[in-house]
Amino acid sequence: MIATRRSFVKLASLGMGATMMAPYHQALAAAGRMVVISNGGDSDAGIGASMTLIDPETLDVLVTLSAPGSLTFPAARWDYTRDIIWGGTREKVVGYSLTTGEEVASVTTESSQNYTELTPDGRFLINAARFTDKLHKIDARPGIPNMSRIVEIADHYDGSNPCDMTMLADGKYAFTPDRLGGTVSVFSIDPFERVASLPLEQLGDDPLEPFMATVSPRGDILLVENARGDGSESVIDVSNPLAPLEIARFAQSDGLGVNPLTSEISPDGRWGVVMCRRANALSIIDMDQVAITGSVALEDESAPLGGTFIPTGERLFVPLPGRDAVAVVSVPGFEVEAMIPVGPRPLSAAYVEADVPERQGMNIPMGAAFEHGRVFAANCSDRCCGVC
């Protein structure tokens, strides 16, 4: 399962210095399916945030558009048919419109980190506000006067620091890892309240700091990334959401890469993929065997950050902010099928089904960091969160 690098070398030579000249690809617009990459931009080069839209079938870049900001961990898993990309930024939750390129929703949370997910029916956005120990239930229905209104607030326990948000496919329960509390908690959506918390056993002197999580679409397994040391991966049985149980924990001795940042699970629940930032690799988990069975090697300084499966599960798109590119990983072979140049510092990916916006594209360098990789600050205060 170790990926070859031939496609990287080939596309890097083609993509170096390329620019996004065409504003709009009319021939591809009818498909209505795209992967949206949120690019953080490059302040030194005077390039702001942008969104690169990719056709998930042909792998063509449709257009790169200006954006009011960038989103590191957006609500990307459910309700694909939408124009608005939701996520947390600074002390608020925002919604960015693909069509207009404007911020169309804003919810103040008083927390400098916010982690969001949509309910599968698209009606509500659930937000974990890390530094206020609260969860928010926000009306996310577009085109109504109350869009972005906080419907309910659920209090978490003091000092929990909820640090991510992931939700079951039926929309009944959501899970959040509690970074400073050392627990994983379960919240029901209706009524909106905490119904369970699982303490994770601390192995060693340092707290685990569970900080990111992904629940399987099958509703049986929750993957949790733990931040401390070289990082570890907890596997939790959530088939009964009211009684979660940790059934395995992976470390580097089990084949897990260094600094597991976040994970994605294939739509059929068969495969888990852990993005290991400092290892520049993806660790592959066989969810049926509950075992790490392989890895995907990426170029040095790729710093993989999140990802999204297309609904068929045949491809996984992984932003590489260190390479200003997106790695397209084929499934179940788990090889890098292509490297696609995008705007500076791609931070997240989301699959949506909507019309390609008829807006003027940005004329910016694409994949400018391909050749050598982007170097991030060594003294980053919180490198596990992925921004630096």
Image: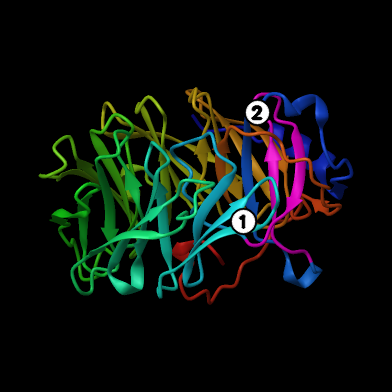
On residue 301, the disc is 1
State which quadrant residue 301 falls in: bottom right
> At 41% across and 70% down in the image, what residue appears?
109
Depth check, front residue: 338 or 107: 107
Magenta extent = 47-69
> Up-down: is 273 above or below 302?
above
Secondary structure beneath dot 2 equals loop
Residue 32's disc is 2
- Residue 59 lies in the magenta stretch: yes
Q: Position of residue 369 (x, y in %)?
A: 74, 55
Horizontally, residue 18 falls left or right of residue 203, namely right
Q: Is residue 49 left or right of residue 281?
A: right
Say whether residue 175 is magenta: no
Three-letter code for the amino acid on which mark 2 is drawn = Gly
Q: Residue 86: give x, y in percent of width and height.
A: 51, 52
**Which amino acid lies under the numbered mark 1 shown in the image of this protein?**
Glu
133 or 239: nearer the eye?
Answer: 133
For the C terminus, which image quadrant?
A: bottom right
| Pointer 1 or 2: first along the chain | 2
Between residues 357 and 40, which one lies in front from this camera angle? 357
Residue 257 visible in the displayed image: no
Label 2 environment density (alpha carbons within 10 Å; few <14, some 14–19, many ≥20): few
| Image vertical order of residue 339 relative to residue 110, above or below | above
Q: In the image, residue 99 lies at what x, y percent?
A: 69, 45
Circle 1/circle 2 CB separation < 8 Å: no
Tell how many labels. 2
Q: Kindly indicate the quadrant of the structure image that contains residue 338.
A: top right
Rendered residue at 52%/46% (across/down):
142
Residue 119: % across, % down: 37, 42
